[in-house]
Image: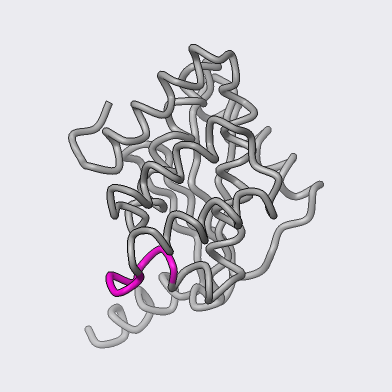
Amino acid sequence: MQASLGGRYASALFDLAVEAKAVDRVEESLSAVRQALAESADFRMLTASPVVARGEAVKAVLATADQLGLDTTTKSFLGVLAENRRLSQLPQVIAAYRTLAARHRGETTAEVTSAHPLSDDQVEELKQQLRRRVGREVSVDLTVDPAILGGLVVRIGSQMIDSSIRTRLNALASAMKG
């Protein structure tokens, strides 16, 4: 899939998940890891800090995996990342894995950034709109970024739809400068 280090790790994990018939379970576990990275400064520090000893990182990440209730494939994989000092690659691995899993299901993944969390109804409506636009099932990877002020930024592959208020204000400011 991808030549990046994170992409190679994701491909390896995906192959293991296919073999174990656990593609969806691993994806759910990775979503829990992604959420933990977003919500826990301690977990982020553990994954990013080069000063955490390898053995301590392995113990900590395995304890976190148990606490999050991750499946055994993902837990083992996190242990390998910690052992190889590659926990900093987790965000890239998660994104690449999601793309592989979506492709495996015949879906396209859309990365969606909104200023505020979207309700379940809004997410469903967005999926329907995107499905009509691309002509296939679309899974959405949601991110919240208050800096866009409002609207959405949607990226599907190399295509980007930016309806954020920040972009509109910047365009207006440029137009006013003449």
User: In screen coordinates, is 22 left or right of 108?
Assistant: right
- Taking the view exactly as shown, the residue that stands out farthest to the right is 121
Quarter placement of the C terminus: bottom left
Residue 49 among magenta residues: yes
Residue 10, quarter of the rendered image: top left
> Compared to 49, does 176 lie above or below?
below
> Compared to 176, does 20 lie above or below?
above
Q: Nearer the viewer, residue 127 or 63?
A: 63
Q: Nearer the viewer, residue 97 or 22?
A: 22
Region rendered in magenta: 46-52
User: What residue lies at 41% left-to-right and 63% top-to-bottom?
Assistant: 47
Position of residue 93 measured from the top left corner of the image (x, y, whole percent): 38, 43
- Taking the view exactly as shown, the residue that stands out farthest to the left is 3
User: In screen coordinates, is 19 left or right of 127?
Assistant: left
User: In screen coordinates, is 148 left or right of 127?
Assistant: left
User: What residue lies at 53% left-to-right and 63% top-to-bottom?
Assistant: 37
Position of residue 161 measured from the top left corner of the image (x, y, whole percent): 44, 50
User: In screen coordinates, is 169 left or right of 136?
Assistant: left
> Compared to 19, does 139 lie above or below?
below
Residue 174 among magenta residues: no
Quarter placement of the N terminus: top left
User: What residue lies at 51% left-to-right and 26% top-to-bottom?
Assistant: 102
User: What residue lies at 18% left-to-right and 34% top-to-bottom?
Assistant: 3
How many numbered circles does the render carry? 0
Position of residue 53 measured from the top left corner of the image (x, y, whole percent): 33, 67
